C-alpha cells in the first residue's frame, strides 16, 4: 500500500488525542466533561484553569499542524495534506477515546490550515478577535472565522484542494456548534469571561 493511503488514518488518530481531557484528568484528577459546557476543548478547560486552557489550545492546534506536516513527510502533495487537515478536525470532534464525543475542532482546524494557508488563518483570527470583542461569544467568533476562512483562502490564492477540504472542515465545525447556535438564538449562550488563574 502506498504511504499516502495511511494519511487519513494517521491524521485522524493525531487529531483524536483529547488533550483538554488529559490535562484536567492529570492535573486535577477530574473529568472536564462534568464541568461547564462539558466540552473537552480549550474554552471549557480555560474556565477551569487558565494555564490548562492555554496549553490545551496550543496542543490542539499543534496536532492539526503535525497531521498536515506528517502528510507531507509521507509523500503526500497538497491534496493529501488538505485531506489530513480535515481528518485531524474529524478526529478531534469524534475522538474514539471518548466514545466519539470530542471538541468543536476550531483550534485543531486553525493549526492544520495554518500549515496550508497561513495568511488566510491570520485573517480569520482577526475576524475571530473582532467578533469576540463585539459579542463576547467565543462560539459566534469561532463560527464566523470558520465560515469566512475558505473565502480568505481563495482570496490569497490557495489551491483548489485546500479550498475544498477547508470548506468541508468549516461545515463540520459549524455543525458541531449546533447546541451553541440554539443557545445563541435563545439568548442563553454563556459570554466569555476569564477563568481562574490556576
Image: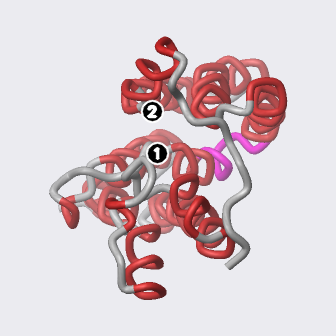
Residue at (46, 28) in percent of width and height: 180
Query: Percent from the top left, x then y, of residue 149?
Result: 65, 27
Label 1 CA crowd tier, 10 Å (few <14, some 14–19, many 20+): many
Dot 1: what SS?
loop
Camera-side residue of 111 and 190: 190
Q: Is residue 31 left or right of residue 186?
A: left
Query: Percent from the top left, x then y, of residue 36?
Result: 45, 52
Residue at (58, 26) in percent of width and height: 143
Residue 105 disc label? 1
Quarter where residue 151 is shown:
top right
Work out whether mark 2 precedes mark 1 in sequence or the reverse, and give the earlier one. 1
The stretch drawn in magenta includes residue 134: no
Q: Distance between the Cα atoms at labels 2 and 1?
A: 6 Å
Query: Percent from the top left, x then y, of residue 75?
Result: 45, 61
Q: Which residues are magenta?
A: 113-118
Q: Residue furthest top?
A: 185
State which quarter of the image contains the C terminus.
Answer: bottom right
Dot 2: what SS?
helix
Q: Which residue is mark 2?
A: 173
Amino acid at each position: 500500500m502506498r504511504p499516502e493511503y495511511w494519511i487519513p488514518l494517521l491524521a485522524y488518530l493525531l487529531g483524536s488525542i483529547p488533550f483538554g481531557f488529559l490535562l484536567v484528568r492529570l492535573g486535577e484528577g477530574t473529568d472536564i466533561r462534568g464541568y461547564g459546557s462539558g466540552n473537552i476543548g480549550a474554552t471549557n478547560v480555560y474556565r477551569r484553569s487558565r494555564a490548562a486552557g492555554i496549553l490545551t489550545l496550543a496542543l490542539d492546534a499543534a496536532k492539526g499542524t503535525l497531521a498536515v506536516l506528517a502528510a507531507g513527510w509521507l509523500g503526500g502533495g497538497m491534496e493529501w495534506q488538505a485531506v489530513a487537515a480535515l481528518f485531524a478536525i474529524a478526529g478531534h470532534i469524534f475522538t474514539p477515546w471518548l466514545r466519539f464525543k470530542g471538541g468543536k475542532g476550531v483550534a485543531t482546524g486553525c493549526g492544520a490550515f495554518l500549515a496550508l494557508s497561513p495568511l488566510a488563518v491570520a485573517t480569520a483570527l482577526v475576524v475571530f478577535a473582532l467578533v469576540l470583542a463585539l459579542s463576547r461569544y467565543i462560539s459566534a467568533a469561532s463560527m464566523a472565522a470558520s465560515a469566512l476562512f475558505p473565502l480568505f483562502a481563495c482570496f490569497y490564492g490557495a489551491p483548489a484542494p485546500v479550498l475544498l477540504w477547508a470548506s468541508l472542515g468549516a461545515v463540520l465545525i459549524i455543525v458541531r456548534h449546533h447546541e451553541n447556535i440554539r443557545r445563541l438564538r435563545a439568548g442563553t449562550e454563556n459570554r466569555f469571561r476569564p477563568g481562574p488563574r490556576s
